[in-house]
Amino acid sequence: MKKKATVIGAGNVGATAAMRLAEKELADVVLIDVLEGVPAGKALDLAEAAPIEKHDAGIVGVTGDYSYARDSDIVIITAGIARKPGMSRDDLLATNMKIMHSVTREVAAVAPRAVLIVVSNPLDAMCHVAYEASGFPKSRVIGMAGVLDSARFRTFIAMELKVSVENTHAFVLGGHGDTMVPLPRYSNVAGIPITELLPPDRIAALVERTRTGGAEIVGLLKTGSAYYAPASAAVEMAEAILKDKKKILPCAALLTGEYGIKDLFIGVPVKLGEGGIEEVIEITLTDSEREALNRSADAVRKLVEDMKRLS
Ligand code: APR
């Protein structure tokens, strides 16, 4: 039976994710936004590319009508607003919390068995809102961060060593932001740890570029943030779930004691299958890696406290 994927937010990330879902024929796609005409227009444009791209995925776009999301297998949530000049971090957090809360309630009412992939920023905080607003089990609320951060790290490793990106593997844990924890020990090229291929100062430079990867793109684009790679990352997660691949990917998951962390969404390796997160994989960390993960958890905890203060 054909699967169904709904993408909330028909902006840059949402529309690109819809395109990739359709072109890979992973599911029929519904695009929902608050804007009049935009989701319908983008969906029609994507549908008109189908004869050339050779796929038969259905794509529809609607404004605010969640009945179209009924019984979706996957819902990717990209709705939100970007920070505008003069807007404080708290204003942005308060606005995006409200948006995430309302869209998740709408989704949960019509697609109670869906797996939610949260993309909107600040990511780890938005995962908490989606988890609470949906009432879904923790296995079905997953944040997209680690796949993107790892892909950025892999890109920089491949550029540095002049090898195929396909030969690279990398793990980035922790929160999505300045405190993310790239793990060079678990990052390799064709199985060879990068710690054996690059001197520590070059690894440190690649780690730093990964950490500031989002800001680097914002700096170049000037208006707006990255969307091709974020969309690819969300769709890789969706594919693992829709095809029940049991694929291990770094994702933001609600921890309940794993890694010594409780009640926080943090990026860790998880196994993704049709049930969403089927297992949190615990890998051994050195003392300094563990410290970095704890620092990252502290930053997420602070965001969650900020949200309580604002709500
Ligand atoms: N319901 C549905 N859609 C909404 C709502 C809402 N309540 N509020 C805003 N949106 C829509 C906007 O109308 C816009 O079309 O969300 C879309 C966001 O798209 P963009 O502004 O283009 O942002 P984008 O680059 O796609 O990023 C989306 O993903 O990577 C993160 O930080 C990024 O939080 C941001 C999100």
Image: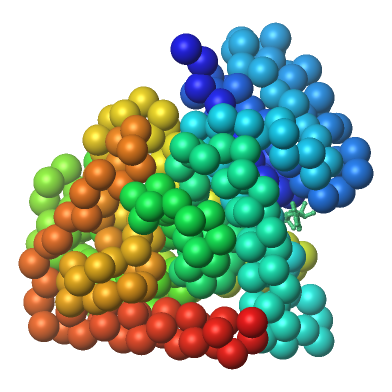
Q: Answer with left or right where residue 107 lies relative to residue 236.
A: right
The reply, left or right, for residue 157 in relation to residue 89 is left
Q: Residue furthest right?
A: 36
Q: Residue at x 11, y 51 (%)?
A: 192
Residue found at x 33% / y 38%: 275
**Residue 304 at x, y percent in the picture:** 48, 81
Residue 105 placement (x, y as % from top left) = 63, 54
Q: Position of residue 159 (x, y in %)?
A: 37, 53
Residue 66, by quadrant, is top right
Query: x, y percentage for residue 133?
Result: 56, 61
Q: Residue at x 56, y 30 (%)?
A: 71
* Observer able to see residue 255: yes
- Name the image colouring: rainbow
> Which residue is more in the foreground, 244 or 174?
244
Q: Quadrant of ligand 1?
A: bottom right
Any part of residue 42 in sight: no
User: Which quadrant does the C terminus fall into?
Assistant: bottom right
Which quadrant of the structure image shows residue 67?
top right
Picture residue at 35% right of the left edge, 42% below the top: 276
